[in-house]
């Protein structure tokens, strides 16, 4: 048997905190991706091979090829 009552205000606070944490995590991932893409663009501009750009940035080859095609 549940000994405590459901408190909507407490539940709302928990949901909001979880949403903030998720938002921060998503923002960090987007920032990391943007940084990797910037590094890849700069490396490609310097003539670095696709394989080395992949190794440096962790991006997949298709994403790197898309960068080349969209210059």
Image (cartoon, helix red, strand yellow):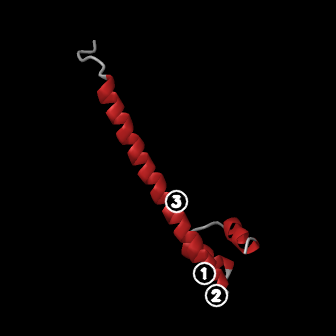
Q: What is the spatial separation of the Cα atoms under label 1 and label 3, in whole angstroms?
A: 18 Å
Taking the spot 52% from the left edge, 59% from the top edge, the residue there is 30
- 8 shown above or below 55: above
Residue 7 vs residue 15: left or right? left
Tell me if residue 2 can be seen.
yes
Q: For the C terminus, which image quadrant?
A: bottom right
Is residue 8 positioned above or below 71 on the image? above
From the image, tell me which residue sits under label 2: 46
**In this rendering, position of residue 59 left or right of residue 21:** right
Q: What residue is pinned by disc 3?
A: 30
| Res 48 seen here | no
Pointer 3 or 2: first along the chain: 3
Which residue is pictured at 30% across the width and 19% down the height?
Answer: 6
The reply to whether callout 2 and callout 1 are in contact (CB within 8 Å) is yes
- Residue drawn at (35%, 41%) of the image: 17
Mark linked to residue 42: 1
Rounded to the nearest angstrom, the CA distance separating label 3 from label 2 is 24 Å
Q: CA distance from mark 2 to mark 1?
A: 6 Å
């Amino acid at each position: 048997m549940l000994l405590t009552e459901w408190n909507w205000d407490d539940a709302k606070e928990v949901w909001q905190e979880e949403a903030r944490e998720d938002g921060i995590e998503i923002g960090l991932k987007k920032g990391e991706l943007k940084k990797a893409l910037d590094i890849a663009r700069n490396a490609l501009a310097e003539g670095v091979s696709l394989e080395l750009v992949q190794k440096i940035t962790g991006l997949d080859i298709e994403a790197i090829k898309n960068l080349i095609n969209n210059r």
